[in-house]
Amino acid sequence: MDRPIGVMDSGVGGMTVVREITRQLPNERILYFGDISRCPYGEKDLETVRAYTIQVAEYLVAKDIKMLVIACNTATAAALEILRERLEIPVIGVIGPGARSAIQHSRNGKVLVLATSGTVKSNAYPDAIMRLNQNFEVTSQACPAFVPLVEELRYKDDIVTGIVIHQALKAHMHSDADTVILGCTHYPLLKESIRRYFEGRKAVIDSGYETAREVSSMLNYQKILRPPAGEVTHTILINGDSSRFKYILRDWLPELKYDMKEIELKV
């Protein structure tokens, strides 16, 4: 089936999910929506995020996508269940896959979630984990400095990254949690730095990687995988100015083949 997979995020962070989808499913085409003009979602109230997410989802469905991936933790928390009820195509968020993987990896039932303020306030990860296993203990930590660190491409500076991570996580350095969930799609670019900070004592879960695995399973189950058909070019739609998006993509995904268009979408 040649219809694309729709992937949406408030900005560029969701491209870490795209990176995993294209790595695991190289034949699939992606139609990505970056809501740059209204970014970030993580600091907005859930009602506003819900309205934005539903609007973007309906816009992508009108483009004939075969699946929707909400590559934003805050948007997943705000609108996943509503969209699953409304849409006739499969809808996958990033919270469930990350929660399930954390349960599988944890040996002592104690998990630390690192996320934006909006995701932490939503309690989405603790709720998802507790629905599966009520014996787990979940602690959440908002890390507002991580997103600008990544978007400004300063995450490659080990000294700066070390200082930012220490300030955000020093209270958890010696915590009992043996598993850490990266609950924001920007954070996978800090995965190895976070792993080193905890001296390898905690498993670090990349929700983007786990989400891509779920996308693969769902497409295979529904028999809607795209067959091999030569070189794949993806489409990226930017609600707003695309210049910084292009700049970041050159660093994150230099091999990705894509066409990018600026659009205007308002509530």
Image (cartoon, grey):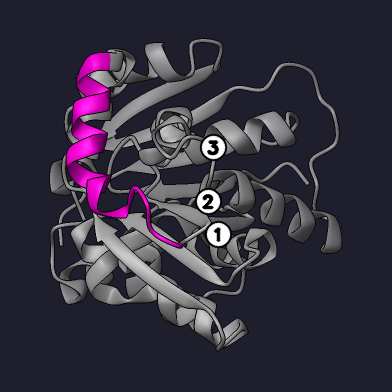
Cα separation, mark 1 vs mark 3, equals 19 Å
In this rendering, would 185 be left or right of 206? Answer: left
Q: Amino acid at mark 2?
A: Ser
SS category of the residue bearing label 1: helix
In front here: 74 or 3? 74
Which residues are drawn in magenta? 159-176
The residue tagged 2 is 207
The dot on residue 17 is none
Foreground mark, 3 or 2, reads 3
Instruction: Identify which residue is drawn at 38% across, 24% down.
Output: 260
Instruction: Identify which residue is drawn at 68% across, 53% down.
Output: 215
The residue tagged 3 is 200
Placement of 47 over or under 69, stated as above or below: below
Q: Amino acid at mark 3?
A: Gly
Q: Position of residue 59 (x, y in %)?
A: 38, 57
- The reply to whether dot 1 and dot 3 touch (C-beta < 8 Å) is no
- The reply to whether dot 1 and dot 2 touch (C-beta < 8 Å) is yes
In this rendering, would 181 be left or right of 48? Answer: right
The tag earlier along the polypeptide, 1 or 2, is 1
Cα separation, mark 1 vs mark 2, equals 5 Å
The tag earlier along the polypeptide, 1 or 3, is 1
Cα separation, mark 3 vs mark 2, equals 18 Å
The residue tagged 1 is 98
* Residue at the limit of the structure toward the front, as seen here: 174
Please identify the dominant SS of the magenta region: helix
In this rendering, would 199 be left or right of 66? Answer: left
Q: Amino acid at mark 1?
A: Gly
Q: Position of residue 254 (x, y in %)?
A: 49, 11
Q: Residues within 10 Å of mark 1 (few under 14, many from 20)?
A: many
> Which quarter of the rendered picture does the C terminus lie within?
bottom left
The tag earlier along the polypeptide, 3 or 2, is 3
In front here: 157 or 3? 157
